[in-house]
Image: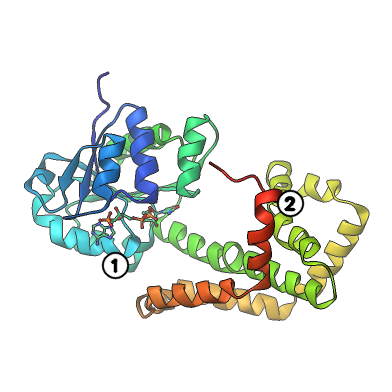
Amino acid sequence: METKGQLLLFGLGSQAKAWALNLRDSGWEITVALRNNSPSEKVAQQLGLPVIAIAGPELSQFKNFLMLTPDESHGQILRQLAPSILAGSRIIYAHGYSFVKESLSSEFPQYGHLLLAPKAIASEVRFQYETVGKLGAAFSLEAAIETDSDEKFLRALAKDLGITGLYPCTFQQECYADLFSEQSLLCGLLPYGALHSYNLLIKRGIPKEIAYMECWLEVKLIADAMIPLGPEKFFKMISPNALIGGEKAQGIIFDKGYQTHLERLAEEIWSGDFFGQVSATDFEALQAKVQEFWRGQDLTRTHRELAPELYPQKQ
Ligand SMILES: NC(=O)c1ccc[n+]([C@@H]2O[C@H](COP(=O)([O-])OP(=O)(O)OC[C@H]3O[C@@H](n4cnc5c(N)ncnc54)[C@H](OP(=O)(O)O)[C@@H]3O)[C@@H](O)[C@H]2O)c1
């Protein structure tokens, strides 16, 4: 099969694996750049992906670079490799974080910086591609060099990655929206809200199995109804008690104090403070602390006991 072009991927982590497989299956010629003695080299071999050394001279043969290493490494990688990456090359990011935090287009004006950010975890990027499903993504051409040809390129790449809905925004909008939704909803409100509700039911004598199903398992079931139905049909479909109770609760919980907290989260992102907070955080130590916290929770023990019989595991 004639290839659609060459792409060089930095890293072979979660997103990179999904991108490499989807794009290769769509006809692109994929090469992976890894650091010396990278444990990912074995993975690349198993997947039949050619590997080059990240700091090797071959870089100058490529024009399109997919930046798929952790966000904190992007600036450092570009600083190290800029002498080998030709001016006019495209650097494609899956998230706007590093570009915004480190002002990478000012530091590297010789490159076109393009954003193609799938709004899905890596496993879903592969799964939706394989099952010809649906995937949304944000894109930005604000730091492109040749806007017309870069747009054509980015749209083709998105389609071949399995993106079915591609929406424009700036790098900053994508970055801030992603950070804010993680904090205010996905990784803040949802799991900790579930925990607080579970703990209260236990305190009131509800058996742990029942509390687990109500407060953890049903998060998925309700989301599975909310997303396809949309808000209007969802609120039409739920039981009278759920509607009355939900309306009562939202009036009590989402008060002025809640709005103030939400504004504070947003303000710390928009002011740039959150970038500083991330830089000042010892990630490994924080992760160990959070793991220890959740390991000690009754909800986690109940999950371990019940998940195998209540939630089918993905193979
Ligand atoms: N994870 C997601 O589901 C998700 C969702 C949307 C967007 N994104 C975005 O996708 C990008 C990649 O995220 P990810 O979670 O897929 O990353 P990841 O799995 O943590 O990436 C790991 C890979 O990056 C390599 N790597 C790490 N530090 C490096 C360095 N300093 N120099 C060279 N290579 C390095 C690792 O090399 P070794 O193999 O040598 O260790 C490994 O191959 C990020 O911009 C992220 O924001 C991720």
Describe residue 250's horizontal placement relative to residue 139 as left or right. Answer: right
In the image, residue 239 sits, relative to residue 315, either above or below, namely below
Which sits in the foreground, 287 or 62?
A: 287
Residue appearing at x 36%, y 80% in the figure: 280
Is residue 158 something one can see in this rendering?
Answer: yes
Give the image location of residue 313, x and y in percent. Answer: 60, 46
Q: Which residue is mark 2?
A: 222
Q: Position of residue 246 (x, y in %)?
A: 83, 62
Could you tell me which secondary element the residue under label 1 belongs to? loop
| Residue 91 visible in the snapshot | no
Q: Looking at numbered disc 1 in the image, what kind of residue is underneath it?
A: Glu
Place residue 284 in its image quadrant.
bottom left
Q: Residue furthest right?
A: 240
Q: Quadrant of ligand 1?
A: bottom left
Farthest residue toward the top?
A: 1
Residue 310 higher or lower than 190, as above or below? above
- Residue type, label 2: Ile
Alpha-carbon span between mark 1 and mark 2: 39 Å
Is residue 112 left or right of 283 when viewed as pictured?
Answer: left
Q: Is residue 84 left or right of residue 293?
A: left
| Residue behind mark 1 | 102
Q: Is residue 175 above or below residue 231?
A: below
Badge 2 local density, few (<14 within 10 Å), some, or many (20+)?
A: few
Please say which color scheme the image uses: rainbow
Reading the chain from its start, which is encountered first: label 1 or label 2? Answer: 1
Q: Tell which of 120 and 64 is nearer to you.
A: 120
Query: Is label 2 within 8 A of ligand 1 (CB to nearest ligand atom)?
Result: no
